[in-house]
Image: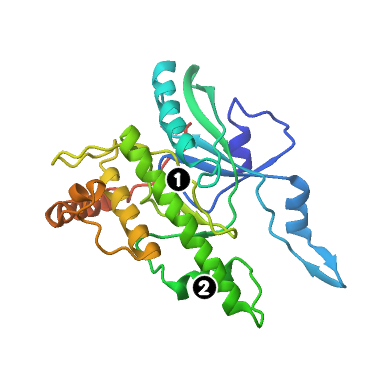
Amino acid sequence: MHKDILGLNFIRDPGIYLYRRHYRSGLRSHIMQVLNPEDVEKEKKGIIINGLRWYPRAEPLKMLRIFRTRFNTLEDADEELKRVGIIQTYLAPDYLARPGEFLVDYSRHGKYEILLCGLQEYVQGQILDPWGLLNRDHLVSLRHDMGFDNTENSARISDQWIRSVRERAQEFIKKLKQMIEETGHVPDLAGAGNLILTRSGNIKLVDINNVSRVSFNPVINLDDRGYPICDKSIEALSLIERKLLGRSSLRTEPIYKTFLDPERMKEVRALDKEFQLSMAAPISWPGSS
């Protein structure tokens, strides 16, 4: 919470912002909301509008990400920043929550470690789950959850919005495929809540902490936590393409031919299940042992 953040040596105390743990618990980073104290005060005490007291939720100004990975050298940290740079080159600004990374010296037990942090753009919208329903009714439901009014013309306006979502999804998919083909990297598209559908109809990637190399050989690559991130991300990409763009014949495409092989996907599912079971243990803050 706020006091935990103030205890970090690279955070100014007193500062002009408040920090609150985000509802999502990041596997690879601690995620904190950066809030305006005045907005938090309104959230707690309420405001009077037309004689009624309302308690508006304080909206984050930014999201503070503190990466869990410790870097032994600046060169190691620079390699991580290069991978993030690849994502920015292909997806920013329309399809990426701009990260704004910086490196800090983190003091721990009298020693200094290199931590990577980011003041990331806060993205409003609803989670887009590649494995969930992405049909018209579900998209209409997501639109309603974003606060769009139901009017007499809502069906026509919803259809226009859905067409926009699908057009933007086509561009999002195009840029991801281009990234894979030209750089051999893919971001984590499979993590829960990593993709947000915005009011404008864009799909935005909000988690850039796990950029994987794409290898088309038979060996299934695992990340440092034992997750088949490359395979699952490309599977997620194929699901978005199939469900939002209505493309059913994907297995023969060069990018998908290897990763959508039924036997390989069966092995990936087993690895995914093993990973999920291993994640039962709680995740600690930087200062804990």
Return the residue nearer the eye: 208 or 92.
92
Residue 71 location in percent, x, y? 41, 23
Q: Residue at x 61, y 78 (%)?
A: 154
Label at residue 26: 1
Quote the CA–CA distance across marks 2 and 1: 26 Å
Kindly state the secondary structure of the residue where label 1 is placed: loop
Return the residue nearer the eye: 247 or 97.
247
Q: Is residue 187 above or below residue 167?
A: above
Residue 279 location in percent, x, y? 32, 48
Q: Residue at x 44, y 40 (%)?
A: 208
Is 208 left or right of 19, judged from the image as shown?
left
Q: Is residue 61 above or below residue 151?
A: above
Q: Is residue 135 visible?
A: yes
Q: Residue at x 56, y 39 (%)?
A: 98
**Amino acid type, residue under disc 1 in the picture:** Gly
Q: Residue at x 55, y 49 (%)?
A: 22
Image quadrant where residue 130 sits: bottom left
Check disc 1: other Cα within 10 Å, few if <14, some if 14-19, many if 20+: many
Q: Is residue 194 visible?
A: no
Camera-nearest label, 2 or 1: 2
Which residue of the protein is positioned furthest toward the bottom in this rendering?
152
Which residue of the protein is positioned furthest toward the right in this rendering?
51
Q: Which residue is mark 2?
A: 141
Q: Is residue 180 above or below residue 168?
A: above
**Amino acid type, residue under disc 2 in the picture:** Ser
Residue 164 location in percent, x, y? 53, 62
Quadrant for the N terminus, please.
top right
User: Is the C-beta separation of discs 2 and 1 under 8 Å?
Assistant: no
